[in-house]
Image (spheres, helix red, strand yellow):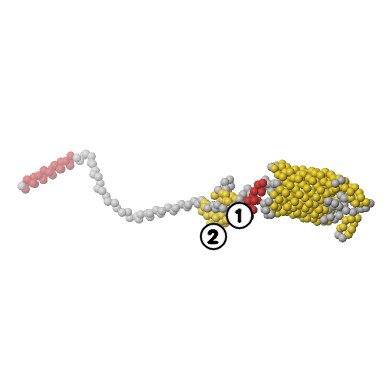
Amino acid sequence: MVKRSVLVSVIAAQLLASIASANTDGPVIPLPPPPVAPVASATPSAAPAKAESPKPELPGVAALHHAPPPTAVAHSTFKIAATIDNPHTIKRALLVYRTGKDATYREVPFLRAADGYVAEVPGESVDYPSLSYAIELEGPDGARSPAYATRGEPHVVDVPGDLDDARETALLERVGGVRSVVSTSGELVSFGHTTATASTGPKTVLDHWYRIEAAYTYRPLRTIMEFGIRVGIVRGTAPVPFDVTLAGETTTKKDNFDVGLNYGAPFVVFRASDEVHLEGHLLTSVTEVGFSTGIGSAIHIGDYFGTKLILGFEHVALFGTRGYSRLDLVRGRVRVSPIVEVTDMPHADRAGVRLLTELGLNLGQGFGLALRGGYQARDFRSGGAGAGVAISYAF
């Protein structure tokens, strides 16, 4: 058994040797290298990269937050509050407002307050019937952008008014929304030929005069309905009393029947009720005799700008007194006014009666025209005609 094993081993060895000798001249096929385990580098590894810093954020956009109030108290300061996000990005915030009676926009800035920002509209601008406003933001370059409402479509706040406010609004609408009136007028009056007492006895004189006047009227349309001033001149001849007392002295006119008056008369009309108005005026003047003063008053019963009855009087020292009644009958743009006046003006020795009719026309565009005509006399034996014209403009 041992011999057999040895023999097998020898045979195997020979076979292997012959195979090796046979492949000596052929190509050698390399075997793949054995896997190599990774070896840690002796050089220290690089430090891990740092996390990138966040990019700076862009500035925020300003935004305004606002709760609009529905009403305001008339003639009281109106405060409007708001909060603003990123206020550092704008130059300022502005409240632009207008009233129901004035379409012109005004503006007030928002100011810092304990809680946010506040803009204040002054009380004199808070008036019946409404207040309209918008809020604008102004950038650093001066450009503005709407933040709440716009000037074209503002937010409207109701301003409840009292009875005086409602009455004023209604009256202002009736007079076309204008408050000022300027006018000028002229009148020529003749009482005919009147017998006067002269130094040589009775004398017939031409009793006549003319008047030129200018006036300005302003209409608050409240408790004070109107006020203004009239200035004018009167010139003519009249049956002047033979003896004239002035400053305690008696002077004789010696047949001088010329009369004259330069005057200024401020006046005011008060509203006592919707149907009753009281007028009063003072008059300062220079007559042909000297300086004098006067007063006058009237009561207007009815619609002040419509149909009404006026009863009045006027007295000017050294010049005369007059009492009158006037009935204004108004229909549309036409007014007809019959007038009855009793007067001893200008500086006559007896009273006369004047019967007049005045026709007033509203021409539109603020213009008005009045024509007056009538008859007057100081006694039953003679009399004369009178005529006048007045032109007015309301603005």
Q: Residue furthest front?
A: 380
Residue at left offset 67%, top offset 53%: 273
Residue 64: x %, y % from top left: 53, 52
Between marks 2 and 1 in the image, the one whose residue lies nearer the viewer: 1
Q: Amino acid at mark 2?
A: Ala
Q: Is residue 249 left or right of residue 42?
A: right
Which type of secondary structure does the marked residue at label 2 adopt?
loop
Q: Is residue 249 left or right of residue 93?
A: right
Q: Is residue 82 visible?
A: yes
Up-down relation of residue 330 to residue 252 (above or below): above
| Residue located beneath label 2 in the image | 114
Q: Residues within 10 Å of mark 1 (few under 14, many from 20)?
A: many
Q: Residue 331's quadrant in the figure?
A: top right
Q: Residue 247's quadrant in the figure?
A: bottom right
Q: Amino acid at mark 1?
A: Ala
State yes or no: discs 2 and 1 in contact (Cβ < 8 Å). Answer: no
Closest to the observer, 255 or 369:
255
Q: Say whether disc 2 or disc 1 marks the residue closer to the N-terminus.
A: 1
Residue at left offset 85%, top offset 51%: 350
Count of numbered labels shown in the rendering: 2
**Label for residue 324?**
none
Q: Is residue 1 left or right of residue 185?
A: left
Residue at left offset 69%, top offset 48%: 303
Q: Is residue 367 visible?
A: no
Closest to the observer, 203 or 62:
203
Q: Residue 251's quadrant in the figure?
A: bottom right
Residue 46: x %, y % from top left: 37, 54
Residue 131: x %, y % from top left: 59, 51
| Residue located beneath label 1 in the image | 74
